[in-house]
Amino acid sequence: MQCLRQFSDFFTHSPGVRLFDERQFVRALELFDGEAQKAPDRRHREYARYHAATCCYVLGQYPRAKRDLILANKWAGKADDRPLRMACVFTLATLEVAMGNHEKGLGIFEKFRALYENRLEPYDRSMLLLNVALTHLRLKQLDEAAQLLDKAQDFARRARDLHLDTYVHYYRSLLLQRQGDQVGALEHLERAAALAEQGGDPYDQARCQWQLGNHWLRRERFDNALKALKKAIRVSKQAGFKVEAAKCLNDYAWAYFKKGRLTEAKSYAEEAILTGREAGVDTANYLDTLEQINAHINDFYEEEKLIAELERETAREFELVGYSDGIIQLADAIRTFAPCNDPVLIYGETGTGKELVAHAVHLTSARRDRPFIKRNCAAIPENLMESELFGHVKGSFTGATTDRKGIFEEANGGTLFLDEIGEMPPSLQSKLLRVLENGEFYRVGSSELVRVDVRLIAATNRMLVAEMHKGNFREDLFFRLNTIKLDLPPLRDRKEDISVLVNHFLFGLNEEFDKYYKVLSEDALQTMEAYAFPGNVRELKNIIRAAYLTSKGRMISSADVSRFFQSGMPVQVRQAAQALPQVAPPLEHHLEEAADAFHDALTEEDEGRVVPFATTELVEKASLKDYVLAAEKRHLLGVLKHCDSVNKACAVLQISRPTFYQKLKVHGISLSNKRLV
C-alpha cells in the first residue's frame, strides 16, 4: 500500500526493498529476515517483518506469512503506527482469501473498510475495492462484485494511474467470464493488456498476457493461447520474475499438451519445475502437470515404440530450444521448406546444431518414415570417399572382396545428410552434381546405372562462395545446393536463449542422476551470458555437465562454470572469475576428482538414490566428454557383469528401460552375447 511510503527511511535504506520491487522474493526474504532480527530501530524491524510476510505470501508460504503479519500488526497497534496496521490487516485479508477462507477474508475486508476506507488516498482505496470485488467474485456474488468494480473505477480515474486502470479492466474481464459473456471478457482483457503495454510495467504486462493465454485455453483456442503465453514468458524472463515465469511455463506446457504435442509439453513442464524451484515456490502443481503428460505418453506409446523413437534421435537433445528471433525464424523456415524435395544447404559454426536442424528437416518432411543417413565428409579418407558415397563391386580395387552399397543407396527414398561438404574433393563434386540433377550414378568398378530418390542436406562452416572463387568448389554444384539455405545463428547472437538451454540441460542431468536437483545461480547465469561460447551450444552443454559433476551442494556458482571457459573468454568474464574466491585450477587438474567432488556433495539420503560415476584413472589430456563417456561405459559394463536381466540392470542403475537401451546404443554395447533379456 502506498501509505507505507510515509516511512521513507525504511524504503531508502533497506537493501531488500529493491529486490522486493524487482520481484526477486527469495533473496528479498533473506534480507528482510536479517533486518527483522538485527535492525537497531524497532519500527524498521517490524516493517521488514511485514515485507518478509509479503514475500512468503507470494511464495506460497502461507502459515509463516500469517504469523509474521499478526506479529507486525500487534506491534503496529501498540505503537499506533496506522499505515503499518492498515497494510497488515489488508494483506491478512488477502492472505485468507488466497488460502481459500473467502468468508473470513471478506469479513476482515469489511471491518477494514469500516475503519479505514474514508481515510485512504484514491490509489489505495481503489486497490482495496478491487480486492474486495475479487473476493465477492470467488464467492460467486456477482452483483456485489460489479458494484465494487464501478466504485474502484471511479477512484482509479481520480488517481490517474495506468496501473489501476489496467486492473479495473482485468477484474472486469473476470466478472464477465463468470457471467458467461466471453466476448465482453475478451474485450476488457485485451484493453487491460494494451494499458499494461502503455504503462510499461513488466509485471502488469506478464500478468495480463498470462490471463489472456488462460482465456484462450479455456476456449480451446490453443494457438492463440501459446502466442499470449509465449509473450508472458518472454516478459517475465527479461524482468527476472521467476514466480510468474514458472506459472506461464506450466500453462504453456499445458497448451502444447492439449494440442497433442507431447514432446514440447514435457520440455516446458520440466522447465516450469526448474524455474519454480529457483523461485522458491511450491512446485506441486507443476509436478502434477508433468505427471499427467508422462501418463499420457505412457498410455499411448508402448515401450518398444518409445525405444524406436529414441533410436530415431527425437529425444530432447535433438529439439530446437530457445525463444530468440533467430530460432523462431529457423523453425519457421524448416516448416516451410521441409515438405519439398530440393537440396538444403546449412551454414553454421561448429556446435550450432547443423545435424539437429538436418534431422528436424527430415522429420518434418514426407520422408520421415524413410532412412536418415548421415556422414561427415571430413572424416572419410579421400581415396575411399567415392566408394563410401556410391558403393563398389567386388574386385574394383584392392580389398574390395564383396559388392557394397554406398550411402546414396542406403538412403534411397529418404534423406542423406553430408556434413562438412566443403571438404569433398573437386573430383567427386561433378559426380555428386549428377546425382542431384538426375538421381543416377555408377558404383565404383561397375557399368550398371543405379537410380535413387534421395533428398540431400549438406552443411558447412566454410564460406563456399570464397572456396568457389579459389577453385576448391564447383560453381554449378554450389548453385544447385544453394536452392534452400538455412543460416544457424551462433550462441553469442542469441544470448536470451542461454537460460533456456541451461534449464534444458540441467533437467536432463537431474533426471540422469535420479532427480538430484541442482540449479544455476544468478551470478553463474550472468557470467555465462557474458561469455562468447566459441564452441556454441555444444560447448555450453559440456560446461554445464562439467560444472554439475564438480560443484558441491545444490547451487552451481559462477566459479563452478567459469573454470571451464576457454582462455579466450571476454575480459569482463575473466575479471569476474578472478574476483571469485577459491576458483579451481584448469580443467585438466580437476577431471580425476570430478566424481569424488560430486559424491561428496550428496547427503546420506541422496547417496542411496544417486548412482555416481566410478572414479577411474584418467588418460592424460583427455577431453571432458571422452572422460565422462569412458567412465559411464565402464560403469555400465560393470553392472552388466552382475545382472542377468534388463530389469535388474535398470534397477541397479536407477534408470528406465528406454534410457538403458539408449545408453547401450551410445556406447556400442550389444546384448547379443549376454544373458540379459
Image (cartoon, rainbow, N blue to C red):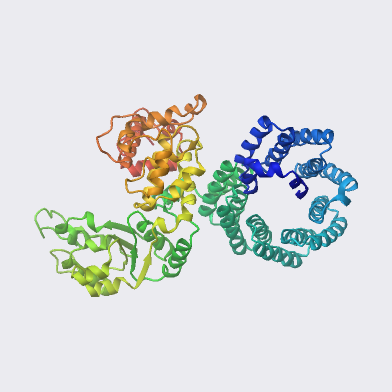
Is 166 positioned to the left or the right of 303 in the image?
right
Q: Residue furthest left?
A: 398
Q: In this orientation, which residue lies closer to the viewer: 402 or 406? A: 406
Residue 405 image point, x, y percent: 22, 59
Q: In this orientation, which residue lies closer to the viewer: 273 or 361? A: 273
Q: In this orientation, which residue lies closer to the viewer: 331 or 171? A: 171
Q: Is residue 621 visible?
A: yes
Residue in the picture at 75% in, 33% down: 67
Is 595 positioned to the left or the right of 171 in the image?
left
Residue 377 image point, x, y percent: 24, 58
Numbered disc total: 0
Residue in the picture at 58% in, 52% down: 249
Residue 32 image point, x, y percent: 66, 37
Residue 627 sits in quarter: top left
Residue 184's place in the image compared with 230, above or below, is below
Q: Is residue 368 visible?
A: no
Residue 382 image point, x, y percent: 16, 58
Residue 260's place in the image compared with 588, above or below, is below
Q: In this orientation, which residue lies closer to the viewer: 398 or 248? A: 248
The quarter of the picture where the C terminus appears is top left
Residue 87's place in the image compared with 597, above or below, is below
Q: Residue furthest top?
A: 604
Residue 434 sits in quarter: bottom left
Residue in the picture at 40% in, 56% down: 492
